[in-house]
Image (spheres, rainbow, N blue to C red):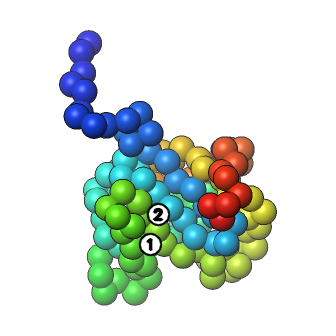
């Protein structure tokens, strides 16, 4: 089956990825945000037995909603500092992982080793 090449697109832009930085923020690329329906706000979820972080699309004004902040319209970020501390999740290295959907929840499996990102970026 043929697919149309999107002008100027790279494989990295087309593949969703999420990076959890050692300093406690989560970054997602455009493809990951598309999986959330281009949401501007998310709720943070955690499935402790499976060690899976979830982001559910939300709206401004919802009690537990966090704003996704855009960086040059190519990257969206949200702070996880309090979330990570609350659940006792240690992030010793910044790691990029490929997220997946469960219903409308974007999931990041912390059991997946992911790829360690450049230490200068942390």
**Which residue is pictured at 66% across the width and 44% down the height?**
114
Residue 81 figure quarter? bottom right
**Which residue is pictured at 37% across the width and 35% down the height?**
10
**Which residue is pictured at 29% across the width and 76% down the height?**
59
Query: Which residue is more in the foreground, 69 or 46?
Result: 69
Spot occupied by residue 45 in the image (x, y as percentages of width and height) = 53, 68
Image vertical order of residue 93 relative to residue 88, above or below: above
Q: In which quadrant will I find the C terminus?
A: bottom right
Spot occupied by residue 95 in the image (x, y as percentages of width and height) = 66, 53
Q: Are marks 1 and 2 in contact (CB under 8 Å)?
A: yes
Q: Residue furthest top?
A: 1
Determine whether the residue tagged by mark 2 lies in a helix, strand or loop: strand
Q: CA distance from mark 1 to mark 2?
A: 6 Å
Picture mark count = 2
Dot 2 surroundings within 10 Å: few (below 14), some, or many (20 or more)?
Answer: many
Mark number, residue 43 = 1
Spot occupied by residue 74 in the image (x, y as percentages of width and height) = 36, 57
| Left or right: where 107 falls relative to 14 | right
According to the picture, the residue beneath numbered tag 2 turns out to be 55
Determine whether the residue tagged by mark 1 lies in a helix, strand or loop: strand
| Upstream in sequence: badge 1 or badge 2 | 1
| Left or right: where 17 falls relative to 2 | right
Residue 118 visible, this orientation: yes
């Amino acid at each position: 089956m043929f697919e149309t090449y999107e002008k100027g697109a790279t494989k990295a832009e087309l593949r969703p990825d999420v990076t959890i930085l050692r300093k406690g923020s989560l970054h997602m690329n455009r493809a990951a945000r598309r999986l959330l329906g281009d949401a501007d706000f998310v709720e943070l979820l955690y499935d402790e037995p499976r060690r899976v972080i979830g982001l559910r699309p939300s709206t401004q004004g919802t009690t537990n909603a966090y704003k996704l902040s855009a960086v040059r319209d190519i990257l969206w970020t949200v702070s996880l500092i309090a979330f990570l501390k609350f659940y006792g999740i240690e992030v010793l290295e910044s790691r990029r992982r490929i997220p997946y959907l469960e219903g409308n929840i974007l999931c990041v499996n912390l059991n997946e080793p992911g790829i360690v990102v450049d230490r200068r970026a942390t």
